[in-house]
Amino acid sequence: MSPSAAAERAAPLTDLLSIEDLDADQVNAILDTTELLLPIAQRERNSVPTLRGKVVCNLFLEDSTRTRISFDLAAKRMSAEVINFSAKGSSVSKGESFKDTALTLDAMGVDCVVVRSGSSGAPLQLSSYLDVPILNAGDGWHQHPTQALLDVFTMRRHLGDLAGRHVVLVGDILHSRVARSEVQALRLLGARVTMVAPPTLLPPAVEGWGVEVARELDAVLPEADVVYLLRVQRERMLGAFFPSSREYARVWGMDARRLSLCKPDVLIMHPGPMNRGVEITGDVADSEQAVITEQVTNGIAVRMACLYLLLAGGTAAGTDTEVGA
Amino acid sequence: MSPRARILSADDVARVCRRLAHELIEANHGAQDLVLLGIQTRGVPLARRLAGLIEDIEGTAVPHGALDVTLFRDDLGSRGPKPLHETSVPVDIDGRTVVLVDDVLYTGRTIRAALDAVSELGRPARIRLVVLVDRGHRELPVRADHVGKNLPTAYGDRIRVLVEDIDGEDGVVADEVAPDTAPDPAPDNDRQVRS
């Protein structure tokens, strides 16, 4: 297989802060690179020396286990060194400012910062303090670009070209950084997106997102290629957005009856962690159509690809184009 | 060498490939346990071609695949991240004779990376190297077991192997670059081979 035309054409990445910053070539370049890195994880010796000597700092200012572990594994499979810096038990809990934390990391000579924060825009702010590539691992309600990339990668593996494919996003879109990134990535790749959510959990000005909005989940399921269930984020629900978990499950949850309304080869996806019995029932989560664990596996390869594209170039030494055969 | 001298014609390449196939069979006492791995990109069609020739001669199918060494290079830091190519190895290489196939042997750095890449895939009984052109100027202690053509070159010369699948024709050409008029490296000179 020759490298993708997109990978040849795509402008180099300097940071990965938001899907909004990317064009279709850059997204496809990341997905094509992921495709080629995926087999490495399945081999007995599952690492490559590519990023040896590079230091990746996981700066996690908000709790996260799966995303941090995924980035950790991705960096290690590329042979980068990983420093884990979390808010708890660090200088941040002693009151150090975000800027001083950033400057400290810079002074220590890290080559890349993976940042997770509860504050929307924190990665962007960090990128203004530091020259090294910044990778957004989720910020507030804003963006979670690697989640969106691993999701579209998983869809593409099953469906091929996503142009014209129909993705139904269900649930708490208002508080969801995943939804924001997801919609932008899907639209770049030409997919059609329908959102189904309680009116209280739809973002204001959703018309500007370029998606369709449906009231009835049952009505849109028969034509869906992908049903993507967002997590009900209880920790972000400061007010009462719906009466109860049971009520949510009845009106918006994916269960066996609703699965039977879908095409037989529909993909059921969820960014995790799942609330079984709320947005998805156990039998649907464990059904053949569910690719939720595959999303997790693909997530490592997507993050390897992002680290490769951000870090393997070193500095922008564009003049040295002597190429080996 | 005049600018764009043709070193080998398509017919010459065909003859060289037949000889290399015979040499491989002779050195291996047959075609058993051989796996031919072409180094991306022009080594891949060459490996496929040699595998076909060996099969014609011996009557045994020879597994062949592709090896991308980009992730194993030691000079990635000095240039942007290169697009990756596929690595596809059709069989378990443990205990087999892996034959690396490349178009041009130059500095030896590609082969060093290829040895690392192969050892990530398994533990072959032995690894051999076949190249269509050896142009000298080694920077590492690397030597090919079978060489199509030894070609003394100046450091700045550009030697290009053309293969039908990629370039539409077979052949080897040299684009001589006089040291004092050497142009700046073009942004896309993947085909300037520096092995």
Image (tube, helix red, strand yellow):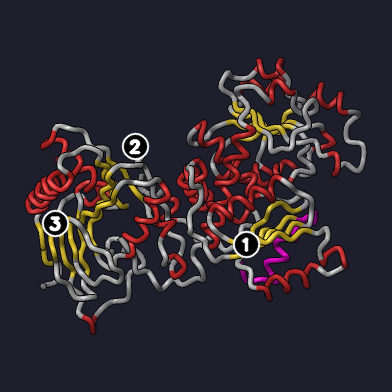
Q: Secondary structure at mark 1?
A: strand
Q: Quadrant of the C terminus of chain B?
A: bottom left
Q: Quadrant of the N terminus of chain B?
A: bottom left
Rendered residue at 72%/73% (across/down): A103
Identify which amino acid the numbered label 2 is placed on.
Val
Which mark, residue B148?
A: 3
Region of the chain picked out in magenta, as a range: A117-134
Rendered residue at 27%/42% (across/down): B35
Please name which of the two marks, 2 or 3, marks the residue nearer to the observer: 2
Q: Chain of mark 2?
A: B
Density class for disc 1 (Cα within 10 Å; few <14, some 14-19, many ≥20) is: many
Identify which amino acid the numbered label 3 is placed on.
Gly
Task: Report, in whole angstroms, how far the alpha carbon at label 1 lies from the one at label 2.
Answer: 35 Å
Residue carrying label 2? B91
Q: Is residue A128 magenta?
A: yes
Are the residues under marks 1 and 2 on the same chain? Answer: no
Give whichever of A220, B66 is nearer the camera.
B66
Could you say where residue A164 lies in the image, as x and y percent from the top left?
Answer: 53, 33
Q: Chain of mark 1?
A: A
In this rendering, the answer to whether A193 lies above or below A103 is above
Q: Secondary structure at mark 2?
A: loop
In this rendering, the answer to whether A59 lies above or below A233 is below
Residue carrying label 1? A56
